[in-house]
C-alpha cells in the first residue's frame, strides 16, 4: 500500500489510502492520517477527489505536502468514520 509521511505540528504522521471502496471508487478516495502505534495511535480520516481518472496510488503520490496538510485540517477523528470502522483511539 502506498504511504507518505508528513510532519504536522512537530509530529510525524503516516498518510495512506483507506482502501474502502464506495460507489465513487474512481472519483473519490479515502485518506487515513495515522500518528503513533498501539493504544496511543491516533487516526483521522478524510476523502478527496483527484482530477482526472487516476489510480489511488498515483493520486496520493502527486499530492503536495501543502495539499496533504489541508486535507489533514479538514479530516475527522477515526471514531466518526466508516473508513476505519468507527475505531476509537488505539483500536
Image: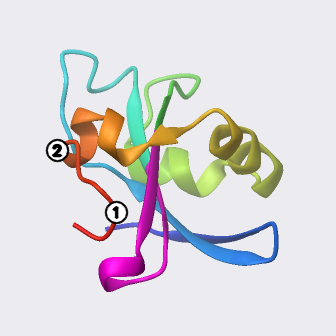
In this view of the protein, which residue sits in the foreground, 61 or 89?
A: 89
Residue, disc 2 = 85
Point out residue 39 in the picture as x, y percentages from the top left corner: 31, 79
The residue positioned 81% from the left and 67% from the top of the image is 9
Q: Which residue is drawn at 53% across and 22% down?
A: 52
* Callout 2 crowding tier (Cα within 10 Å): few <14, some 14–19, many ≥20: few
User: Which residue sits at x=34%, y=34%?
Assistant: 80
Q: What residue lies at 40% left-to-right and 74% top-to-bottom?
A: 41
Q: Where is residue 45 in the image (x, y as percent from the top left)?
A: 44, 43
Around disc 1, counting alpha carbons within 10 Å, would you say few (fewer than 14), some (14 to 19), or many (20 or more)? some
- Label 2 sits on a secondary structure element that is loop
Instruction: Specify the segment rendered in magenta.
Output: 32-45
- The Cα–Cα distance between marks 1 and 2, rounded to whole angstroms, is 12 Å
For residue 15, above or below residue 24: below
Residue 40 in magenta stretch: yes
Give the image location of residue 22, x and y in percent.
Answer: 19, 24
According to the image, label 1 marks what residue? 89
84 relative to 46, above or below: below
- Which residue sits furthest top? 23
Q: Does residue 67 appear left or right of residue 18 in this picture? A: right
Amino acid at each position: 500500500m502506498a504511504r507518505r509521511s508528513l510532519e504536522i505540528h512537530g509530529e510525524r504522521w503516516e498518510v495512506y489510502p483507506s482502501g474502502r471502496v464506495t460507489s465513487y471508487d474512481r472519483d473519490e478516495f479515502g485518506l487515513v492520517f495515522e500518528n503513533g502505534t498501539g493504544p496511543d495511535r491516533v487516526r483521522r480520516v478524510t476523502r478527496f477527489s483527484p482530477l482526472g481518472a487516476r489510480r489511488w496510488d498515483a493520486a496520493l503520490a502527486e499530492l503536495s505536502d501543502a495539499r496533504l496538510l489541508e486535507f489533514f485540517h479538514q479530516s475527522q477523528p477515526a471514531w466518526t468514520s466508516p473508513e476505519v470502522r468507527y475505531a476509537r483511539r488505539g483500536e
